[in-house]
Structures are given as structure tokens and as C-alpha cells.
Image (cartoon, rainbow, N blue to C red):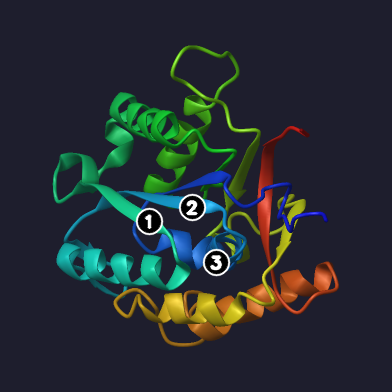
Amino acid sequence: MTRPHMLGLRAGDQALVVAAHPDDETLGMAGTIATMSDLGIQVEVLAVACASAPMLGGISDSATRHSEFRDACEVLGVTGAIAWTDDARAANPGAFPVELVALIEDALARTAPAALFIPAGGHHQDHSAVHRAGLAAVRPGRRTGRPLPRIILGFDGPEDRIWLNAGLDRPVMVDITNAAPAKAKALLCYGSQLRQDPHPRSLEKIQALDKAAGAACDVHAAEMFALYRMTAT
């Protein structure tokens, strides 16, 4: 009997999701995370930076965001950690490129994942920095203690999906129809970060984007990914 799989990933495989901030993993790919978890794929989420500071539309409070992150990870059935909180690195990860690449390399060495998910660039400076560091951490060329995942994909937040990255090639699609309720529940954990419709970071608009992606592959809802590496086994 063939075991259920997603992108060739099966129960017992490891996946690592690297997000710039706690909430990006849920905004960008909670349905895929929940689907992997349901299949028995072991998922670890590494959120790089969390800082208390003014932000567009409100205030980012690190204690609140830590709590929201824990709740969202529990909903999605995954383990999660936040690396840098309320220090110079958290305030500006892009100013610490060596440390950022090392952080991701350490997570790769610890988890040896079959799949790595990273931000697909975007307009936010932290997302772009984590994107570059993620690609640097898995650049070709094996060395001891540096596993290379056979699947490397990039995810977008809702703002980038409708603006800077709109129309860019996102050839990998994951059917999240069955995971849509879990994604909605995880999104609602981030009460400090969601916005009111018609903001792109509203629950309504995120679900609309997922339904539009689903229409492209004849399912109810889907998430789309940039493709950096996919090696058949």
C-alpha cells in the first residue's frame, strides 16, 4: 500500500520552515504546515526575529508575539522557536548576515530536513535578508555537518502576493482544502498582526488569495511556492 505523501514527503520525514518573524509562517503557509503535520511529517518552525517596536498599523510587543507564536504552533501541531528577541539582531537581521546564515545552517544541521521553506524575498527588508541567508545556507557544495535538503521552496506573505511578487512564477502548488480550518484557527492566534478587511493581512483577503490559488489547480484552496530545488528520490 502506498503511503500518503506531499511533494514526496512522507511520515517520519523532517521539514524546516524559516520565517523572518513569528506570524510569517502562518500568513504564508499555515495550510501546508498543517497538511505536513497531519501526514506525520515532523515540522520545525524557526522564526528569526521578534522585536518590540512601532509598526505599520500598531505596535509589535515581543511578549505578545511569543505567546501568539506558541499558540499558532500548537494549532498547527509543530514545534517552534524564536531565535532573536529585542536585541540589535532582532531589530535589523540584515545587518548581521554572517550570524543569520550561521543560524539557519545550525538549524539545518540539527534537523537534517528533507524540505526547507524560506521567505521568497519580498518588499520587507527582514524577509529579503532571511531569503538571501536561506539560499546561502543551502548553496551547492556539500561539507560535513551541512545537509542539503532535496526540496527548497519559497513562500510569500499576503502583501507580497498582491504587490511586489504578484505575477512571479510560483510553480509549486499545495492543496490545502482540508487544512483551511486549521489555517484560519492559526491565523486568529495572531490577533496583534491581523488587520481588518480590505487589508491584505485580513483573514478574508488571505482566504480569498488561497481560493484564487486553488482555482488555478482545480481545488478549493491552495498555497503557492517559488521553487529553488526539487530532487527526486
In the visual, does 201 lie left or right of 52? right
Q: Nearer the viewer, residue 211 or 233?
A: 233
Ranked by sequence position, the earlier of labels 1 and 3 is 3
Residue 34 disc label: 3
Of label 2 and label 3, which has the lower sequence position? 3
Could you tell me the amino acid type at mark 1?
A: Thr
Which picture quadrant has residue 229? top right
Q: How many marks?
A: 3
* 3D distance between C-alphas at marks 2 and 3: 9 Å
**Callout 3, which amino acid?**
Ala
Residue type pointed to by label 2: Val
Residue lying furthest front: 1
The residue singled out by tag 1 in the image is 79
Image location of residue 170, percent across then percent down: 72, 52
Please, is residue 139 above or below residue 226 in the view?
above
**Residue found farthest to the right:** 218
Q: Position of residue 199 (x, y in %)?
A: 48, 80
- Residue 115 screen position, x and y as percent: 59, 41
Q: Decide if residue 117 is in sight here.
A: no
Residue at the location (44% across, 76% down)? 187
Which residue position is annotated with label 2? 43
Asked which secondary structure carries label 2, the reply is strand
Q: CA distance from mark 1 to mark 3?
A: 12 Å
Question: For this rendering, which residue is in front, 18 or 6?
Answer: 6
Residue drawn at x 14%, y 51% as measured from the top left: 86
Residue 164, image quadrant:
bottom right
Camera-side residue of 27 and 8: 8
- Of the 4 image quadrants, the one containing the C terminus is top right
Q: Is residue 57 above or below residue 82?
A: below
Give the vertical position of 84 relative to 183 (above or below): above
Residue ID at (38%, 35%): 107
